[in-house]
């Protein structure tokens, strides 16, 4: 379960304080799939980063399974992320000095799992990257990097998966395939999905759509 309570995020700029997230609250139950939509600049990426404990709110609370992330140390938050959270960044954030395979193996190494290479290879094949395992991120196209990022998020079988425009760089066919993988995780593993998207068709597949406008929830 993910519970957001009265979340506020402000940035200090040369022109004073800028409120980006303005008192947002919602609860997402375990196994739910939720699309977050809204105009560019409305605060979707900021909201996702706060919900996943990657960013610190100005005020408000973020609970994952009844644990308040805002009260945890950075180390404890990292533990919660390793154990429960998968995150697909809008700009992928692959580690440039690691190959595709090594990038995908990283979360499993952090969890101290065994037999990780085989598992990572299987997931890379699932996202259509067989034969690209040894490529470094700079040797991959944007869509291929996005699929490595997806594989890295899928590999640890997270309880809750945050995806920031996971199909933003993909062609129709690959995008349909990636959508299937996301919703398969949701159905088969009961993975909670929180997906930011500009794609109305992807949003329609989710159980619920949250529309963000100017840092607030417009409709839920
Ligand atoms: N560190 C920061 N300092 C100041 N302003 C910021 C910072 N990070 C984000 N913003 C501002 O917050 C607003 C929301 O940004 P955010 O990235 O959350 O939007 P978004 O809804 O994800 O947009 P897009 O659909 O284009 O990805 C933007 O106007 C952005 O300029
Ligand atoms: Mg964004």
Image: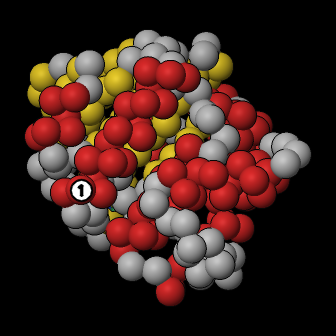
Ligand 1: which quarter? bottom left
Q: Nearer the viewer, residue 17 or 25?
A: 25
- x and y, in percent, of residue 186 in the image: 44, 25
Residue 130 placement (x, y as % from top left): 55, 66
181 sits to left or right of 175 = right
Q: Is residue 131 above or below residue 124?
A: below
Callout 1: helix, strand or loop? Answer: helix
Q: Which residue is mark 1?
A: 173
- Which residue is depicted at the point 36% across and 74% down? 142
Residue 191 placement (x, y as % from top left): 51, 25
In this view, 49 is above or below 24: below
Picture coordinates of residue 125, whole percent (x, y): 55, 57
- Image quarter in which the C terminus is found: top left
- Observer-nearest residue: 175 or 17? 175
Does any portion of residue 214 appear in the rendered image? no
Q: Do we see residue 88 in this rendering?
A: yes
Q: In the image, is 114 to the left or to the right of 202? A: right
Q: Quadrant of residue 180?
A: top left
Image point (68%, 54%), residue name: 120
């Amino acid at each position: 379960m993910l519970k957001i309570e009265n979340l506020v995020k402000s940035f200090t700029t040369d022109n004073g304080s800028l409120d980006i997230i303005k008192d947002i609250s919602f609860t997402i139950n375990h196994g739910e799939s939720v699309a977050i939509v809204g105009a560019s600049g409305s605060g979707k990426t900021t909201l996702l980063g706060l919900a996943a404990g990657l960013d610190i709110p100005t005020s408000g609370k973020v609970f994952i399974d009844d644990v308040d992330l805002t009260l945890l140390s950075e180390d404890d938050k990292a533990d919660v992320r390793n154990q429960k959270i998968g995150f697909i960044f809008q700009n992928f954030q692959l580690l440039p000095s690691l190959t595709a395979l090594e990038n995908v193996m990283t979360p499993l190494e952090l969890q101290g799992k065994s037999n990780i290479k085989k598992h990572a290879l299987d997931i890379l094949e699932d996202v259509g990257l067989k034969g690209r395992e040894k490529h470094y991120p700079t040797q991959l196209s944007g869509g291929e990097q996005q699929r490595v990022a997806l594989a890295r998020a899928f590999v640890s079988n997270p309880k809750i998966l945050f995806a920031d425009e996971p199909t933003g760089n993909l062609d129709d066919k690959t995008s349909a395939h990636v959508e299937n993988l996301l919703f398969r995780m949701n159905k088969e593993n009961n993975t909670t999905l929180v997906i930011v998207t500009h794609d109305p068709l992807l949003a329609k597949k989710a159980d619920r759509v949250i529309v963000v406008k100017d840092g607030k929830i417009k409709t839920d």
